[in-house]
């Protein structure tokens, strides 16, 4: 079978293909939020997934996420897309239970390509402790793949995006730069090893980080994806009613990404993320660090707001588990985001 370069069939790949956050806010503003005592998380305010209470001990977490190819290898594409969707459940404090494929592919593509996409997704679903149990596929000139995922969480164990408090410490569990590295790869400018490092990050589930975090009862958690670090920090700050101060020099960065940002590599998502968040951000950071903070991420890490008195033990526990945990900022009284 002749290899099919999947990215040649896509206008934008991964979470960089997300609808602009500013336009999405406008669309959702016209919807009346559903009202139910058992809808614990819905559109008011929106979070990483919806949560519906079944009883005092159980709630279901539901999310859906899909996008066009960001790499040419079909199996890797399926694995990244599945990881990105599954991570929304982990970001809510939940555990994935069941997943369904959401797929759109040109009929001209060999069936083996879609088979490889599904195989890559199935491997990640199993690694998350869940089951890939079916799905729906339509014809489309641009390939797209992702998952609808159902998980479970205790009603008193939900990790909201809107719970950060003054005095909290802010952490990140994965390096930034996937959008810039992938754009450089499309342009033929990616340094040796940078794509492999980006792929390794994107297929890494947030399951182990969430398992280490769970006993510490964080105040707020979200995952960093298409709106970039600054877009997601703005959401956390505005919905929590706090001010977040980020240390740009403390943010972990993928190999090669800083040099590429310094050389001017940007994605289309960079502009859309600035349109969304820049009005809320005071930045004195170098241009390349600011670009990485706006860079759209795919299957990024957890962004965690944790009370400062638990910080030292949390850091030691993550280190003992071999999990990355970078202290990237702090939460203060006020509003807005500072990047220094």
Image (tube, rainbow, N blue to C red):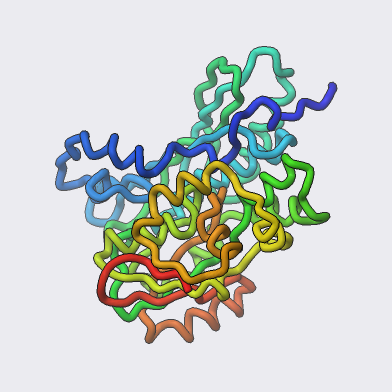
- Examine the rendering and report whether any part of residue 174 can be seen: no
| Residue positioned 49% across, 32% down in the render | 100
Residue 323 picture location, percent across and down: 60, 70
Q: Is residue 311 above or below residue 203?
A: below
Q: Is residue 172 above or below residue 228?
A: below
| Residue positioned 52% across, 70% down in the render | 285
| Residue positioned 25% across, 72% down in the render | 334
Q: How many numbered badges does the structure rendering display?
A: 0
Say left or right for 151 vs 29.
right
Q: 97 or 178, which is in the foreground? A: 178
Residue 117, quarter of picture:
top right
**In the rendered view of the protein, which quadrant contains the N terminus?**
top right
Residue 236 picture location, percent across and down: 35, 61
Say left or right for 309 vs 75.
left
Residue 300 picture location, percent across and down: 55, 55
| Residue positioned 72% across, 25% down in the render | 113
Say left or right for 194 vs 169.
right
Q: Is residue 8 above or below residue 285?
A: above
Q: 294 or 131, which is in the foreground? A: 294
- Examine the rendering and report whether any part of residue 297 can be seen: yes
Say left or right for 80 vs 334.
right
């Amino acid at each position: 079978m002749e290899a099919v370069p999947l990215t040649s069939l896509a206008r934008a790949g991964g979470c960089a293909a997300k609808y602009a956050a500013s336009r999405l806010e406008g669309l959702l503003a016209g919807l009346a939020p559903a009202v139910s005592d058992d809808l614990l998380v819905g559109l008011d305010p929106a979070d990483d997934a919806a949560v519906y209470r079944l009883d005092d001990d159980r709630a279901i977490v539901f999310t859906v996420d899909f996008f066009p190819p960001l790499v040419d290898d079909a199996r890797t594409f399926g694995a990244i897309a599945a990881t990105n969707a599954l991570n929304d459940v982990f970001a809510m404090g939940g555990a994935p239970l069941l997943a369904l494929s959401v797929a759109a592919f040109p009929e001209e593509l060999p069936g083996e390509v879609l088979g490889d996409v599904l195989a890559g997704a199935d491997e990640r679903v199993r690694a998350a402790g869940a089951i890939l149990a079916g799905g729906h596929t339509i014809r489309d000139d641009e390939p797209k793949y992702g998952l609808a995922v159902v998980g479970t969480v205790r009603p008193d164990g939900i990790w909201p995006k809107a719970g950060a408090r003054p005095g909290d410490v802010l952490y990140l569990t994965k390096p930034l730069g996937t959008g810039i590295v992938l754009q450089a790869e499309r342009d033929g400018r990616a340094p040796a090893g940078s794509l492999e490092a980006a792929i390794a990050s994107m297929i890494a589930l947030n399951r182990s980080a969430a398992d280490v975090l769970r006993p510490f009862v964080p105040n707020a958690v979200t995952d960093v994806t298409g709106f970039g670090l600054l877009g997601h920090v703005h959401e956390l700050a505005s919905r929590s009613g706090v001010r977040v101060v980020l240390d740009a020099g403390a943010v972990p960065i993928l190999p090669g990404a800083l040099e590429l940002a310094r050389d001017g590599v940007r994605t289309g998502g960079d502009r859309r993320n600035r349109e969304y968040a820049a009005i809320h951000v005071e930045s004195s950071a170098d241009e390349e660090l600011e670009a990485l903070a706006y860079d759209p991420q795919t299957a990024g890490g957890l962004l965690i707001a944790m009370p400062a008195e638990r910080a030292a033990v949390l850091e030691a526990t993550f280190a003992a588990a071999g999990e990355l945990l970078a202290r990237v900022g702090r939460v203060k009284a006020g509003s807005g985001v500072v990047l220094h």
